Image (cartoon, rainbow, N blue to C red):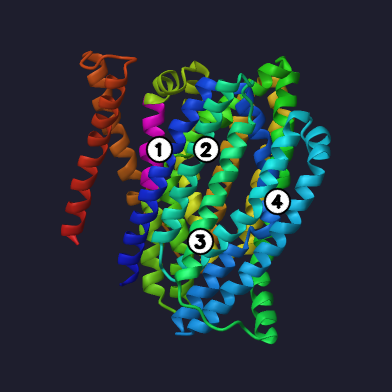
Amino acid sequence: MNQKQYLLKGTFILTAAGLLSRIAGFFYKIFLSRTVGAEIMGIHQLILPVYAFCAAAAFGGIQTAVSKHVSADLAKGAKREAWNSFLAGLFLSLLGALFCSLLLFFGSGWIASVFLGEPRCSPLLKILSVSLPFAAVHSCVSGYLVGQKKVLLPALSQLAEQIFRILFSFLLYFLFLEKGYSLSAAIIVLGQAAGEAASAASCFLFLALSPRFSLPKKKELRADIRATLSVSLPLSSSRMLLGVLQGIEAALLPLQLRKFGLTASQALSEYGTFSGMALPLILFPTAITGSLGTLLLPAVSEAKSASQNRQLHSTIEASFLASLYLGFFCVNAFLLFGDEAGRLLFDSPAAGEYIVGLSFLCPFLYTNNTLSSILHGLGKTGAVSFLHTFSFVLRLLFVVLLVPAVGIEGYLYGVLLGQIFLSVSFLALLFKSTGYVPDPGRALLLPLSLCLSATGCMYLIRTLGLIPENTWAGFFLEIFLYLAAFLLPGSRLFLLRNRSR
């Protein structure tokens, strides 16, 4: 299988699983927004950066290191060395996860009261601490499989995690109702822990059935651990720092909203609406860019190791343009349908306003995911980590300085500026590393013309009143027509361009 076929097939498998998982998770978010409410969703959102920090400290960069080393070893035909790289990564992941799990469990009270300023988070953090070792196994095995260009099991384990998470939460919800208990964020967190356990179980099944080599000698294991740490430590350090910054942001944003004039309950509700309803919809298409990015890292690493510069440039251009076109398609779609989506999906006009405001992130956010994976594959882990950190610091400055004056809009401005900074910096670093420069016609003029034509078609349809507004049938019909108006001219232009070549 050549590189192009691998990327297409692998991206399709991971994207299919990712989309199914996102669709299920999206309807799960709708269910939560209509049952537990925005405030409880806001409390749940507060603890996620703490969990992200612990995961980053325990095994954050190890999946990337395992994937990179396994793909490089297999490119040289060294299957035993690839297995040793996996075992070293698994050992480090489990060791770090157990240590962080104990710290999180016994330190949950202090973290909730002092750092997050919300004592109700303490029992939730205790529950999450149990899921860290399961997540470590899942992460490491997924990295091993992706390094081998086997993407089916990571896709299935991702889907299993989401299904078990949702089913377990549903069971708890109906149990709470039957027993007369008050609904809390524990329903969400227990579901998350069940999902991690299910994904780890699928990975253990793979390990039991897969061919294995003998255990490495101590000298080999030490060498593999050093090699893994050389890649994972810069990435883990960056993710830990980002986890700390995300935790500070999660704690600061409700406080700054209170300075703007909201009550504590209103601030948590607004934070929950923004981060638990609007943002997941904006991030929904990252199932595609995330899948592509997962496959790009070993593909780029392998092409670089084999000095296949032409193949490297072809891979970079195809993946960058695909992510950029997706971004243009989505920013236009969210501008057109964001308000209606907020009302119909979440029964929240505020969510619709946030969706429209966040829409401008799409071209930058989606391409940054892809560019980041390419640069990691090129060995630019330290530079990427620094740029991510600097971008997040910009966001925090906007939270501190602008949110008390203008409200949540100040945060939106900070997020947008941070993503623009990342896009410019990543492209500059990519040019310096490979000499790649995007074609302005294909990167800007073509997608902009498609957006304008699709917008014109939708404006005409709405002006003529051909589709009923504020109904599910009308909403999905409009999306279908927009999809056709964007893709049909685009595919025709693409075919004509290829023929001219």
CA–CA distance between discs 2 and 3? 20 Å
Residue annotated with mark 1: 23
Numbered label attached to residue 203? 3
| Residue drawn at x 33%, y 54% as measured from the top left | 12
The nearer-to-camera label among 1 and 2 is: 2
Q: Amino acid at mark 2?
A: Phe
Measured along the vertical axis of the image, is residue 47 above or below residue 85? above
The quarter of the picture where residue 415 lies is: top right
439 or 498, nearer to the observer: 498
Whichever of labels 1 and 2 marks the residue nearer the N terminus, that label is 1
Percent x, y of residue 482: 27, 31
The nearer-to-camera label among 1 and 3 is: 3
Whichever of labels 4 and 1 marks the residue nearer the N terminus, that label is 1
Question: Horizontal placement of 98 versus 483: left or right?
Answer: right
Q: Amino acid at mark 1?
A: Ile
Please state the extent of the stretch shown in magenta in the rendering: 324-336
CA–CA distance between discs 4 and 1? 27 Å
492 or 228, nearer to the observer: 228
Residue annotated with mark 2: 168
Q: Amino acid at mark 4?
A: Cys
Quadrant the C terminus occupies: bottom left
CA–CA distance between discs 4 and 2? 24 Å
| Residue drawn at x 70%, y 47% as measured from the top left | 129
Question: Horizontal placement of 179 versus 163: left or right?
Answer: right
Marks 2,3: beta carbons within 8 A:
no
Residue annotated with mark 4: 54
Marks 1,2: beta carbons within 8 A:
no
